[in-house]
Amino acid sequence: QVAVVESGGGSVQAGGSLRLSCQFSGRTIISGAMGWFRQTPAQEREFVAAINSFSGSTLYADSLKDRSTISIDSVKNTVDLQMDSLKPEDTARYYCAAKAGVTVLSKSRLWWRSWGQGTQVTVSP
């Protein structure tokens, strides 16, 4: 298991932006898949975006595809999720996930191996 720690959540007004960061065991990024999910009390955890450090490939959920960018920051050793034009329906707890040693990505939460505790994002109208 890898320790996963998220940061960067907060409260913004609709139309604003937030940048979430994910760090792994206080060291380098994962060699494999890293991703973001989100969950509200009323819904199951849903996929947001993912990136693979081997291939550089990315995958996005349709709901945020045109408003978010996932990237690897090789200086800070983090995986970041930039979210723009935020909407109230984006309000959720955002979780970072990782799976080492793979060259593919998956939108299924069951596929991922390691999870952080989450960071809250609240978007007001």
Image (tube, rainbow, N blue to C red):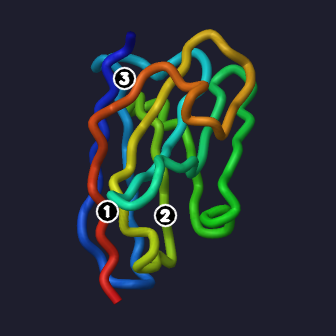
| The label number, if any, that marks residue 121 in the structure image | 1
Q: Nearer the viewer, residue 76 or 20?
A: 20
Give x and y (percent) for residue 76: 37, 33
Q: Give, as a three-letter code, the residue at label 2.
A: Met
The image shows residue 33, relative to residue 19, as above or below, that is above
Give x and y (percent) for residue 71: 56, 43
Give x and y (percent) for residue 8: 29, 52
Say if mark 1 contacts mark 2, CB within 8 Å. yes
Q: How far apart, in angstroms, are the residues tagged by discs 2 and 3?
A: 21 Å
Give x and y (percent) for residue 33: 60, 25
Mark 2, residue position: 83
Residue reaching furthest front? Answer: 42
To which quarter of the image does residue 5 belong? top left
Location of the N terminus by quadrant is: top left
Q: How far apart, in angstroms, are the residues tagged by discs 1 and 3?
A: 20 Å
Q: Which of the two discs, 1 and 2, labels the residue nearer the N terminus? A: 2
Mark 3, residue position: 24
